[in-house]
Amino acid sequence: MGKLLFLLLLLGSFALVFIQVQATVCMVCNSFKSGHCLAGKSNCTTRYKPGCRTRNFFLFSNTGKWVHNHTELDCHKACLAENMYLGALKISTFCCKGEDFCNKYHGQVVKKKIY
């Protein structure tokens, strides 16, 4: 009886290790632009799915094109990948999980021209 109980406890603890929800660490930045965080740099930890959120903000220009304004990075428990349009503002949302800082490099990088 003692060996059977020990075996059941061992199997139960083994299952808990694999079923346990893993936390994901996300980059937080209120204004990410040209590959750098300009304001509000930190990180957050989430156990929620999908976890890390990247929101790219675009403004509609006079030339008829969407121009990247800035990116926001954070944790969000109800993240949905979507494009939202609010007049001349477009917010493009990307969600990721399972890898720490998976939202770090999703900001729009503006390439500078060399003359």
Image (spheres, grey):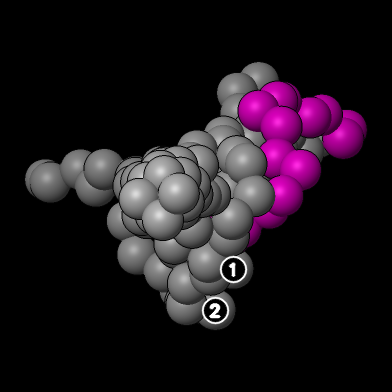
Q: Which residue is mark 2?
A: 40
Circle 1 packing at 10 Å, graded few (<14), some (14-19), many (20+), is some
Q: Between 74 and 70, which is closer to the camera in this rendering?
A: 74
Q: Are marks 2 and 1 in contact (CB under 8 Å)?
A: yes
Q: Is residue 75 left or right of residue 110?
A: right
User: Residue 99's spot in the image, x, y percent?
Assistant: 36, 46
| Magenta span includes 51 | no
- Residue furthest front as drawn: 1
- Residue furthest top as drawn: 64
Q: Is residue 15 left or right of residue 114?
A: right
Q: Please report the residue visible at 71 percent of the width from the left and 32 percent of the height from the top.
A: 80
Q: Please report the residue visible at 72 percent of the width from the left and 49 percent of the height from the top.
A: 77
Circle 2 packing at 10 Å, graded few (<14), some (14-19), many (20+), is few
Q: Amino acid at mark 1?
A: Asn
- Please tell me in which quadrant of the rendered image residue 47 appears: bottom right
- Residue furthest right as drawn: 87
User: Residue 15's spot in the image, x, y percent?
Assistant: 45, 42
Q: Is residue 59 something that shows in the picture?
A: no
Work out which quarter of the rendered image holds the C terminus and state it: top left
Magenta highlight range: 68-87
Identify whether 69 is placed above or below 94.
below
Disc on res. 30: 1
Q: Amino acid at mark 2?
A: Gly
Identify whether 81 is placed above or below 30.
above
- Please tell me in which quadrant of the rendered image residue 31 appears: bottom right
User: Residue 22's spot in the image, x, y percent?
Assistant: 47, 52
Q: Secondary structure at mark 2?
A: loop
Cα–Cα span, label 2 and label 1:
5 Å
- Residue furthest left as drawn: 115
| Magenta span includes 83 | yes
Q: Please report the residue visible at 41 percent of the width from the left and 44 percent of the height from the top.
A: 4
User: Residue 86's spot in the image, x, y percent?
Assistant: 87, 35
